[in-house]
Amino acid sequence: MFRALVVEKGEDGGTQAGVQTLDEGRLPAGDVTVAVEYSTLNYKDGLCMGSGGGLVRSYPHVPGIDFAGTVEASDHECYKVGDKVILTGWRVGEAHWGGFAEKARVKAEWLVPLPEGLTTRQAMAVGTAGLTAMLAIDALEAHGLSPDALHPVLVTGASGGVGSVAVAALAALGYKVAAVTGRPENGDYLRDLGATEIVARDDLSETVNRPLESERWAGCIDAVGGAMLARVLGQLAYGGSAAAVGLAGGSEVPARIIPFLLRGVNLLGIDSVLQPYEARHAAWRRIAAELPMDKLEQMIQTATLDDLPRLGSEILKGRVKGRVLVEIG
Ligand code: NDP
């Protein structure tokens, strides 16, 4: 038997989430069973604990798009009992039962081994949000971003999960970091993570008539999308790139083509869900080596399975700061 957060669908079409004790026989098919130690709260988890956001395939459902823990049983040659593993992506917690449970069963190819130097707790403090931030940094650097750039790197949605890890990781790598937030009270928090400049959300929310503005940013990690991303494209330095990670502010981008033609800027799409094994593993190794763990600690609030339904609706309202670490095992 194991405890899990289960989302049920009522006859009226509404959903209800609560902790239940389940028999192990109810776990889905898979070749590796993991005793989950930690999970975390992501924006998608908020959706999957509520309406489902079009992501959940069937009910009852166990959400949790990522987890870290210890292999308890394995039918796959790559993993043996006792191995420490991380799971992110592959629609686990959406189409498959996920990590908001003491046990999870998944396909071996969805896992990566816990990299040396990282605990399962730290791995989930980073979580999908932090992995995505690192994938965005990888992509920006592959397109020419380097710490000696004249301008700072902009991070939007900075006090959220992706944003917080992006700010800390960029600062640790030697970049100047400008952090956009709609919550001025988080200014000290973002400066402590390494931001050198705080930009008010309102400064970038307005659409302007000019397709090009003064060059302000060497690059951008954008968790917000919408009008803000369009505005940022017109402020990127010549040849700079914006990594599009999220849509916390909207999925429609009223952008002009001019910055692409006259400044050679790039818009890079970042997906963490279907990243091939090698890229995921490399990003986790880089996180273990380069993300300052003292800064990571500053981002964490801890939660239990019972806290998740409340926190799920908070993250959808943009009210969660940093990373929520869910203590399970
Ligand atoms: P969070 O809710 O933790 O962070 C989002 C942040 O965006 C908020 O904290 C807030 O920051 C800002 N924000 C919220 N609403 C608005 C708004 N209306 N306009 C402008 N800014 C807003 O979420 P995550 O960091 O976990 O995820 C961020 C985005 O990235 C989500 O859209 C998520 O789905 C996506 N994502 C994508 C992944 C991928 O593989 N591409 C993987 C993981 C996440 P502040 O208060 O500081 O302004």
Image: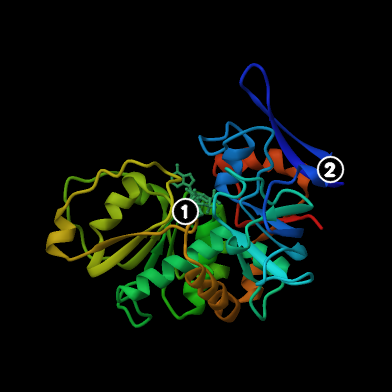
- Asked whether mark 2 and ligand 1 are closer than 8 Å, the reply comes as no
Disc 2: which residue: 23
Compute the Cα span from label 2 to label 1.
Answer: 40 Å
Write down the quadrant of residue 177 in the picture. bottom left
Q: Tag 2's secondary structure?
A: loop
Q: What percent of the width, then of the height, locates residue 289?
A: 58, 81
Q: Tag 1's secondary structure?
A: loop
Q: Residue at x 62, y 41 (%)?
A: 314
Q: What percent of the width, then of the height, locates residue 287?
A: 56, 74
Q: Residue at x 74, y 46 (%)?
A: 27
Q: Earlier in the sequence, mark 2 or mark 1?
A: 2
- Residue 187 in view here: no
- Asked whether mark 1 and ligand 1 are closer than 8 Å, the reply comes as yes
Q: Amino acid at mark 1?
A: Gly
Q: Callout 1 environment at 10 Å: few (<14), some (14 to 19), or many (20+)?
A: many
Q: Callout 2 environment at 10 Å: few (<14), some (14 to 19), or many (20+)?
A: few
Q: Amino acid at mark 2?
A: Asp
Write down the quadrant of residue 62 in the picture. top right
Furthest-right residue in this view: 1
Q: Nearer the viewer, residue 32 or 127?
A: 32
Q: Coloured how?
A: rainbow
Furthest-top residue in this view: 12
Q: What percent of the width, then of the height, locates residue 307?
A: 75, 43
- Side of 310 where 265 appears, left or right: left
- Tell me, for residue 270, which label it has, or none: none
Q: Residue at x 72, y 48 (%)?
A: 100
Disc 1: which residue: 157
Q: Residue at x 78, y 49 (%)?
A: 304
Q: What percent of the width, then of the height, locates residue 256?
A: 18, 49
Write down the quadrant of residue 146 in the picture. bottom left
